[in-house]
Amino acid sequence: MSGQNTQSGVVFLKSNRIILRPIERTDIPQIIKWVNDPDVRQYISIIFPMMETDEQEWFDNLHRRKPNDMVFGIVVDEKFIGNMGVHGISWTNGTATTGAFIGEKEYRGKGYGTEAKMLLLHYLFHTLNLHKVCSTVIAYNKRSYAYSMKCWYKEEGRRKAQLYRKGQYWDEVLLAVFREDWEPLWEVFAREHNL
C-alpha cells in the first residue's frame, strides 16, 4: 500500500500539510500492518497479534460507539500515514481522551502528529465544546511525550509500574490539556499555519 493513493477525497479537518478524515474499511490492511509492527506496537496498548477479522470487528464497533468515539486517518500528500482518535467523550463533563500514532516511519519526527493533534483539539474545544482532553503515554515513549507537550498537555500524574513492556514495568504518564490553557497556543499555531 506504500506509495498508493489512499486519499478518498473525504476531508473532515484540514491544514496546509495534513488532512484528518474518517477511517475507512479500505484502511484496515494498512492498520494491521502498523499495529503488528513491533516498532509501533511497543508504544500502543495492543500486545497480541491482530488479524483482519479483529480489525473488521473494531471498525464495525466504531459505528456503534458514535458519538463517543471517533478515529481519523492522518493523510499527507494523499498518503495515509497514521491514526488519531478521540475516545470516551463525556458530554456531561466535557472531557475525552485522545491517542495517535504515525505508522509510516519516514513521516515521524516531522511535526505531522503535532499538527494533526492541534487540528483535533481545535475541533474538540471549538465545535464539541469540551473543556479538558486527556491522554496517556508509556514512560519510555519520549517522542509522544514531547509532542504532547508541544500541544500544551501537562503531566497530571503517573500510574507507577502500570504497564509491562520490554521485560519490565513502566509508569503510565497521565496527561491533560485544558481549553483555556490551550487557546493562546492555538492563536500562534493558526497564524503560523495560515489557518
Image: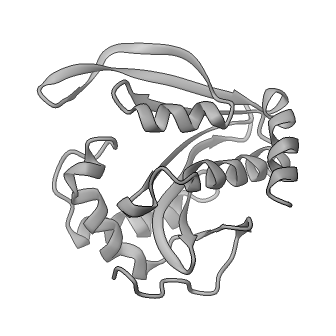
Question: How many numbered discs, if any?
Answer: 0
4 horizontally vs 157: left or right: left
Residue 182 sits above or below residue 116 on the image: above
Residue lying at the far left in this picture: please name it: 167
Q: Measuring 64% from the left and 57% from the top, which residue is drawn there?
A: 67
Q: Tell me residue 146's x, y (percent).
A: 52, 32
Q: How is the image coloured?
A: one colour
Residue beneath the point at 35% across and 67% down: 31
Image location (x, y in percent) of residue 132? 71, 31
173 left or right, relative to 34: right
164 left or right of 11? Answer: left
Q: Nearer the viewer, residue 109 or 21?
A: 109
Q: Quadrant of residue 125?
A: top right
Residue 175 position within the rendered picture, expressed as x and y whole percent measured from the top left: 56, 26
Percent coordinates x, y for residue 154 in the rendering: 63, 22
Q: Is residue 115 left or right of residue 57?
A: right
Q: Nearer the viewer, residue 112 or 99?
A: 112
Which quadrant would residue 184 be assigned to in this image?
A: top right
Q: Is residue 26 above or below residue 110?
A: below
Which corner quadrant holds the C terminus?
Answer: bottom right
User: Quadrant of the image for the N terminus?
Assistant: bottom left
Seen in the picture, residue 177 relative to 35 is either above or below; the reply is: above
Residue visible at 61% across and 51% down? 68
